[in-house]
Image: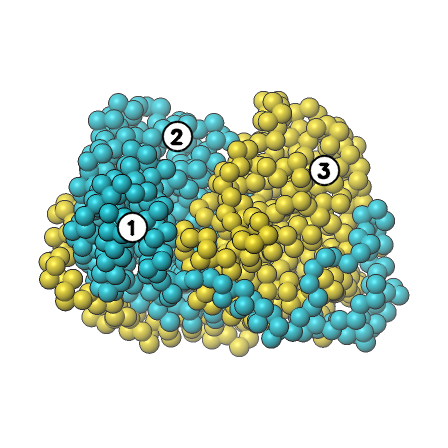
């Protein structure tokens, strides 16, 4: 197998350089450097992969494959459920393409990484402002893994092994939470909800809470889009029993919705993707993780976090990673988490996005989403065969549509809508059989009046087609 | 570093002016406004946010300039040599970045109808097959967001396997060599195992006798990096596999060092049952200042059933998301993986092909051995373990002698390296070497750059013996000099947000 490849990514692949280098080492050929790999384990054939390709070929090939996708640009899509379409200003893309940032490693050498460290500190600070918390780390993988880590954190703090979560919880978050907590023997118990309003059943919570509960978790807005209103009661019930109160958020709601720090949250988790990160078929996402200013909590924080300090000579302010003694590279098996690579660049995107939005932009965007969501609910409510929203509560961005009266499955309706170039909401009938034929619809600032009207028209047409 | 602006960039909260705005939010159409009325009334009074969040108020141009200035205060692979051992800081091809920005992927939603996302599913399916071929495994899951996430998944698969065999109760121990990455023992704990550490022998490899003694019917598995963190190929990998497998344990491959053996040797062939890959190390996707990465794992045929759902499948015509896997460990995250990152790795493999990947391995190893040769005789530095044996893609030198003779430590050397406009190596790892400097040049740097690094290290050695203070007080040419990391973490002064910083400053004034 002779191989003569001078690849643009590999400067020393030219024979002349190789020869100079092998001479210096004192060997005949680079093959000798693999002499200690047991014969038995040497691959005797070439890998079964494509041939090397020019950049143009790579581009053409990948573009051809991806052209088979249909996107939000090709159809009116009303999907959310943990990954949402929001406008990403051009500035965000410009900044995260700065390769001084994107091609750097975790800032282990703070003196050479002040830019990234400051950007992450600013991210943490902005997350604290919108959630009304004091402490944030510089990212987790996604909301689901943040939740898993948060619940594990509460068990370290309380030495209790049970947590209460709402029955209305994203199935992917519930499953991830199970995966994260099962190995340490934790039990996750759902709390019922009111079928009429979706609201957490506080009476059920009261019967389930005890001194054995490490954490009470709620989401606001809830997975199914409605606003939980009894948040202060839930906080009180949790705290009265020595449990920690974890709140999950969609950060874009926090320009209009009361932030969890103002109703007693000890830990806040959430999905940061809406903050300047495209959907990307569901990843990378950005796990938000914030908590109160309490050293007990801070010492148990998972993941990396950046702090302000001074230079040793006291002349200048600077930034560095803090409390690394919590982390795996120092504490090994006793670390608070195994997380190493996180989603830093997505956090930088979020910081740039929030800086562009500013306080008034946050409020205006929140109000725009509220208005459009309500407009969609109004229009859909007028359609025969549809109950929208299903829950009698306030909603943000998402709401459940029930099709029981239409006597048609969500899946059938979905197929028919597609023919009108409309993609309906996520089918939640299997997740919550008690909701009947139901789907979770999402409307953001990206949906125009025409898009929403088109949805209403398409639904009306589709449901009319049957009767 | 030289060329960096050295003025401070103020924190964003100190910039701007009340009333400025960085973007105009999409307007709500009049008809919608009329239909829904005042947006405030759409939320119950007690759940409304009263004050505005105290975000900075900047114009678009100020935001751009602020973050461009911050980027100039940072050092990446595109800035220069980045020999950070264990992290494989290789070149990140620009075409891969451009392709990952295509709206045909960025604007797809994970719950879109399968028929609308055949393109991205094809990328994922083919990538997983390629990665299985590269690692010699049966099936690959692309879901883990990072290497450590893959490790966590690996421990869950071990559990699931032992549970199915009714052995989970007794198999409570995970064996990890003392030279392992910190994520290995941490992942073991997250997976609910007790971690048992085995020592290395005089060659820096796993000590077989010690391993034999540590392994028992309680052993769930072993996590191993090969080539190991010293850059040495584990000569007894067959024996190691034999010991673990005959005890009923599973063998896990930490793919941090896979770059060295691409196309040369495959973990699956060595007997590993579970293998993770770091796409942000081996397959050229950028590290992003700490992420996003991707840590797919490959498994043997017996373990395939435990992989997380959904699996991307192909029926010969169409790609599907398959959730019907009763033995699956279910989910470790939402959705299907860091797709944006996966796409870059797909383009990377397409560009290099089989021949190119093998060349990557060979040149990364050539570069490491060349640089080692140039460094090992510099005064004050030594090459511990297995002298005379080739390294793979990285090597570790010790500054123990330098410290003894001059008072200059590995930490000081690394800080002085920054002064010469080069990123420092990994220091104080692996833990089995005192004053360790772990150097991984990767295939991405030219000989001239390696020569320059060798000269810099020689100069630093000279400085240590003649004017040690120059090294001890380094760095001087960076944005900031050495930072007070104790103060940064002290309960009295710790500040993890601007809000907290202002509060603490206030308290200290009182």
The image quarter containing residue B407 is bottom right
Cα–Cα span, label 1 and label 2: 28 Å
Q: Residues within 10 Å of mark 2 (few under 14, many from 20)?
A: some
Cα–Cα span, label 1 and label 3: 56 Å
A244 sits to left or right of A34 = left
Q: Is residue A119 visible?
A: yes
Q: Which residue shows up at 61% across the image and 64% down it? A: B348
Tell which tag, 3 or 2, sits nearer the viewer: 2
Q: Which residue shows up at 54% across the image and 53% down it? A: B318
Q: Mark 1 = which residue?
A: A441
Looking at the rendering, in which quadrant would you find the N terminus of chain A? Answer: bottom right
Q: Which residue shows up at 35% across the image and 47% down it? A: A412
| Residue B417, x across and y down, in percent | 62, 66
Write down which chain is painted cyan: A
Q: Residues within 10 Å of mark 1 (few under 14, many from 20)?
A: many
Q: Residues within 10 Å of mark 3 (few under 14, many from 20)?
A: some
Residue B287 disc label: none
| Residue A199, x across and y down, in percent | 22, 37
Q: Relative to the observer, which residue lies in front, B9 or B475?
A: B9
Tell if the residue under mark 1 belongs to the same chain as the one under mark 3: no
Give the mark, 1 or 2, whose residue is nearer the N terminus: 2
Cα–Cα span, label 3 and label 2: 39 Å
Helix, strand or loop under label 2: strand
Reply above or below: A135 against A316. Answer: above
Residue B199 disc label: 3
Chain letter behind tag 1: A
Q: Is residue B459 visible?
A: no
Residue found farthest to the front:
A467
B461 sits to left or right of A201 = right
Q: Which residue shows up at 84% across the image and 51% down it? A: A36
């Amino acid at each position: 197998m002779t191989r003569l490849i001078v690849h643009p990514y590999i400067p020393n692949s030219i024979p002349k350089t190789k020869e100079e280098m092998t001479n210096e080492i004192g060997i005949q050929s680079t093959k000798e450097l693999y002499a200690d790999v047991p014969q038995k384990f040497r691959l005797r054939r070439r890998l079964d992969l494509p041939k090397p390709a020019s950049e143009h070929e790579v581009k053409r090939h990948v573009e051809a494959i991806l052209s088979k996708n249909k996107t939000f640009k090709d159809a009116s899509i009303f999907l959310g459920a943990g990954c949402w379409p929001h406008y990403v200003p051009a500035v965000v893309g410009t900044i995260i393409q700065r390769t001084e940032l994107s091609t750097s490693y975790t800032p282990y050498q703070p003196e050479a990484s002040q830019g990234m460290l400051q950007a992450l500190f600013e991210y943490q600070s902005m997350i604290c402002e919108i959630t009304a918390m004091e402490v944030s780390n510089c990212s987790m993988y996604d909301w689901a893994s943040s939740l898993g880590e948060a619940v594990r954190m509460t068990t370290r703090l309380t030495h209790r092994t049970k947590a209460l979560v709402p029955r209305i919880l994203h199935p992917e978050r519930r499953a991830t939470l199970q995966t994260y907590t099962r190995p340490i023997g934790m039990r996750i118990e759902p709390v019922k909800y009111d079928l009429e309003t979706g609201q957490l059943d506080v009476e059920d919570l009261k019967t389930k809470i005890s001194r054995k509960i490490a954490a009470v978790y709620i989401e606001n807005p809830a997975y199914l889009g409605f606003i939980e209103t009894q948040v202060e009661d839930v906080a009180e019930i949790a705290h009265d029993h020595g449990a920690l109160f974890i709140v999950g958020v969609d950060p874009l709601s926090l320009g209009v919705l009361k932030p969890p720090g103002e109703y007693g949250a000890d830990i806040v988790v959430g999905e940061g993707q809406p903050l300047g990160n495209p959907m990307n078929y569901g990843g990378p996402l950005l796990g938000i993780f914030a908590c109160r200013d309490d050293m007990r909590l801070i010492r148990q924080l998972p993941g990396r976090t950046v702090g302000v300090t001074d230079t040793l000579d006291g002349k200048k302010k600077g930034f560095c990673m803090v409390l690394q003694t919590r982390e795996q590279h120092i504490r090994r098996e006793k670390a608070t988490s195994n997380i190493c690579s996180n989603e830093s660049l997505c956090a930088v995107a979020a910081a740039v996005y929030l800086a562009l939005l500013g306080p008034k932009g946050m409020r205006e965007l929140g109000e725009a989403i509220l208005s459009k969501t309500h407009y969609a609910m109004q229009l859909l409510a007028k359609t025969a065969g549809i109950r929208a929203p299903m829950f009698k509560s306030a909603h943000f961005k998402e709401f459940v549509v029930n099709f029981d009266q239409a006597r048609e499955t969500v899946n059938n309706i979905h197929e028919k809508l597609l023919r009108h170039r409309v993609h309906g909401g996520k089918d939640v009938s299997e997740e919550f059989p008690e909701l009947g034929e139901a789907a979770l619809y999402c409307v953001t600032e990206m949906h125009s009046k025409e898009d929403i009207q088109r949805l209403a028209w398409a639904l009306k047409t589709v449901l009319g087609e049957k009767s | 570093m030289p060329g960096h602006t050295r003025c401070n960039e103020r924190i964003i909260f100190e910039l701007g002016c009340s009333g400025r705005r960085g973007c105009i939010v999409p307007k709500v159409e009049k008809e919608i406004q009329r239909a829904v009325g005042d947006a405030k009334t759409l939320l119950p009074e007690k759940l409304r946010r009263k004050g505005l969040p105290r975000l900075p108020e900047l114009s678009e141009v100020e935001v751009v300039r602020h973050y461009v200035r911050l980027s100039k205060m940072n050092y990446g692979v595109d800035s220069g040599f980045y020999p950070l051992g264990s992290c494989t800081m290789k070149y990140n091809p620009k075409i891969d970045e451009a392709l990952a920005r295509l709206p045909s992927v960025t604007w797809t939603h994970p719950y879109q109808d399968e028929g609308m996302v055949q393109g991205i599913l094809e990328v994922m399916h083919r990538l997983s097959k390629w990665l299985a071929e590269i690692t010699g495994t049966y099936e690959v899951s692309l879901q883990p967001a990072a290497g450590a996430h893959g490790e966590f998944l690996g421990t869950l698969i071990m559990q699931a396997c032992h549970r199915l065999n009714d052995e989970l109760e007794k198999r409570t121990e995970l064996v990890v060599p003392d030279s392992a990455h910190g994520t290995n023992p941490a992942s073991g704990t997250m997976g609910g195992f007790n971690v048992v550490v085995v020592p290395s022998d005089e060659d820096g490899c796993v000590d077989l006798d010690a391993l034999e003694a540590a392994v028992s019917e309680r052993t769930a598995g072993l996590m191993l990096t090969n080539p190991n963190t010293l850059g040495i190929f584990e000569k007894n990998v067959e024996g190691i596999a034999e010991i673990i497998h005959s005890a009923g344990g599973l063998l896990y491959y930490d793919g941090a060092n896979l770059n060295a053996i691409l196309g040369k040797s495959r973990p699956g062939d060595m007997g590993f049952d579970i293998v993770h890959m770091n796409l942000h190390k081996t397959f050229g996707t950028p590290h992003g200042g700490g992420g996003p990465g991707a840590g797919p794992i490959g498994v043997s045929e017996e373990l395939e059933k435990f992989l997380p759902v959904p699996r991307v499948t192909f029926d010969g015509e169409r790609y599907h998301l398959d959730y019907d896997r009763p033995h699956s460990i279910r989910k470790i995250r939402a959705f299907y993986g860091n797709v944006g990152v996966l796409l870059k790795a797909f383009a990377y493999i397409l560009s290099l092909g089989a021949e190119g990947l093998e060349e990557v391995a060979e040149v990364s190893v050539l570069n490491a051995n060349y640089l080692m040769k140039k460094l090992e005789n510099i005064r004050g530095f030594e090459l511990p373990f297995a002298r005379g044996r080739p390294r793979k893609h990285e090597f570790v030198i010790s500054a123990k002698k330098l410290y003894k003779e001059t008072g200059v430590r590995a930490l000081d050397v690394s800080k002085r390296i920054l002064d010469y406009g080069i990123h420092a190596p990994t220091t104080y790892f692996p833990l089995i070497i005192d004053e360790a400097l772990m150097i991984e040049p990767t295939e991405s740097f030219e000989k001239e750059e390696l020569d320059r690094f060798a000269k810099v290290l020689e100069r630093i050695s000279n400085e240590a013996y003649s004017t040690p203070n120059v090294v001890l007080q380094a760095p001087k040419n960076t944005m900031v000099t050495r930072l007070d990391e104790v103060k940064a973490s002290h309960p009295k002064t710790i500040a993890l947000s601007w809000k907290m910083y202002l509060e603490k400053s206030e308290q200290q004034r009182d």
